[in-house]
Image: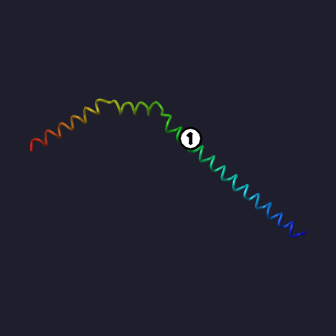
Amino acid sequence: MLSNLAYSNTLANTNLSQQNAVSNQQAMNELGISIVAKASNTISNLGPLEARSAVEILTNDELAQTIADMKATLQAFSTRS
């Protein structure tokens, strides 16, 4: 009878350990999901400064003109020699 009680106690402890492991795994998965969601939200929601910077870089004609001038200068010097 004592061995049955010891076996029952061992099974109960094993069961609690497995439940604890599953609970910890679920908590880590939920934490990972919330971290990924926060990171993607931060990346996708641009503030006014970031949005203005993106527009300035993509539509700034002065930068395009400077690049075209540099390219023309390089071509002029390469055809002289």
For label 1, the SS is helix
Quarter of the N terminus within the rendering: bottom right
Q: Locate residue 73 relative to residue 31 in the image: left or right.
A: left
Q: Nearer the viewer, residue 42 or 25?
A: 25
User: Among all residues in the image, which is located at the extreme left?
Assistant: 81
User: Among all residues in the image, which is located at the extreme right?
Assistant: 1
The answer to whether 25 is drawn above or below residue 80 in the figure is: below
Q: Locate residue 8 relative to residue 32 in the image: left or right.
A: right
Quarter of the C terminus within the rendering: top left
Color style of the picture: rainbow
Q: Position of residue 68 (x, y in %)?
A: 23, 34
Q: Residue at x 56, y 41 (%)?
A: 38
* Image quadrant where residue 60 sits: top left
Mark 1, residue position: 38
Q: Residue at x 13, y 43 (%)?
A: 78
Q: Locate residue 33 relative to residue 19 in the image: left or right.
A: left
The answer to whether 61 is drawn above or below residue 8 in the figure is: above
The answer to whether 35 is drawn above or below residue 3 in the figure is: above
Badge 1 density bin: few <14, some 14–19, many ≥20, Cα 10 Å: few
Q: Position of residue 31 (x, y in %)?
A: 62, 47
Q: Position of residue 8 (x, y in %)?
A: 83, 63
Q: Residue at x 76, y 61 (%)?
A: 14
Q: Amino acid at mark 1?
A: Lys
* Image quadrant where residue 65 sits: top left
Q: Position of residue 2 (x, y in %)?
A: 89, 69
* Image quadrant where residue 35 sits: top right
Q: Nearer the viewer, residue 56 or 29?
A: 29
Q: Nearer the viewer, residue 19 or 45?
A: 19
Q: Residue at x 21, y 34 (%)?
A: 69
